[in-house]
Image (cartoon, helix red, strand yellow):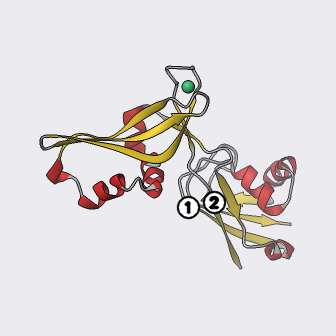
Amino acid sequence: MLNTWVVTPTCLPLVLRRCHTCASERFRANGKFRVNANHKLLDAWLLVLCTVCGDTAKLTVLERVHVRSVRPELLDRMHDNDPGLAAELLQDPVVRRRNHIALDWDGAWRLDTGGSDHLDGEVLDVSVRFAARIPVRPVRLISEGCGLSRAEVGRLITDGKLVSAVRLSGRLSGDFTFMLKR
Ligand SMILES: [Zn+2]
């Protein structure tokens, strides 16, 4: 039987970016936007606050874009300070590259395994789905989901009892499957 585990965000990730006021490197989005119209051109930013001094920085979302080429739904969501939109934009690689930021997902996600009944069988088949592209170590997920230490998970990989089409060392942020034979 195939089990499905889901890596789910629990809050917005922190934004890694140097603060010009206090030299901290972490900002938090609070879901607020600023939109500025100049004639027919729009600029829009997602606001982020320094986690140490509270200073505000602006992440560019739209830059001198003609008002007619912006989807009205997007504008509405920015005017409504939609936190879901903030999450979508932070996960957009184009937005991250443009603003030279990276994300810190520590403590901002959880693993849903749907209970521990699946742990009894001799063979455990698991499909791991990512509800957002959160970079995590498969070893950490498997140790948490199976109630094993990371060293034990490492040994199972070495012994060929834990197999996957992807490399289980390192980090992943996309769906994968693995099989554990006891
Ligand atoms: Zn600061």
Q: Quadrant of the N terminus?
A: bottom right
Task: Using a 10 Å C-alpha cutoff, classify the residue at mark 1 as few (fewer than 14 neighbours), some (14 to 19) or many (20 or more).
Answer: some
Residue 103, compared with residue 52, is above or below; it is below
Q: Residues within 10 Å of mark 2 (few under 14, many from 20)?
A: many
Rendered view: 8 above or below 23: below
Decide if residue 33 is on the left or right side of residue 64: right
Q: What residue type is labelled 1?
A: Ala
Count all numbered tags in the image, as a single digit.
Answer: 2
Mark 1 or mark 2, earlier in chain: 2
Q: Name the residue under label 1.
A: 131
Q: Do the residues labelled 1 and 2 touch (CB within 8 Å)?
A: yes
Q: Nearer the viewer, residue 46 or 5?
A: 46
When asked about the image quadrant of residue 130, the answer is bottom right
Left or right of 120 in this view: 78: left
Q: Position of residue 10 (x, y in %)?
A: 62, 56
Kind of residue indicated by mark 2: Val
Q: Name the residue rendered at 72%, 59% in the picture.
A: 163
Q: Name the residue under label 2.
A: 7
Residue 103 is marked as none
- Residue 108 percent location from the top left of the image: 64, 50
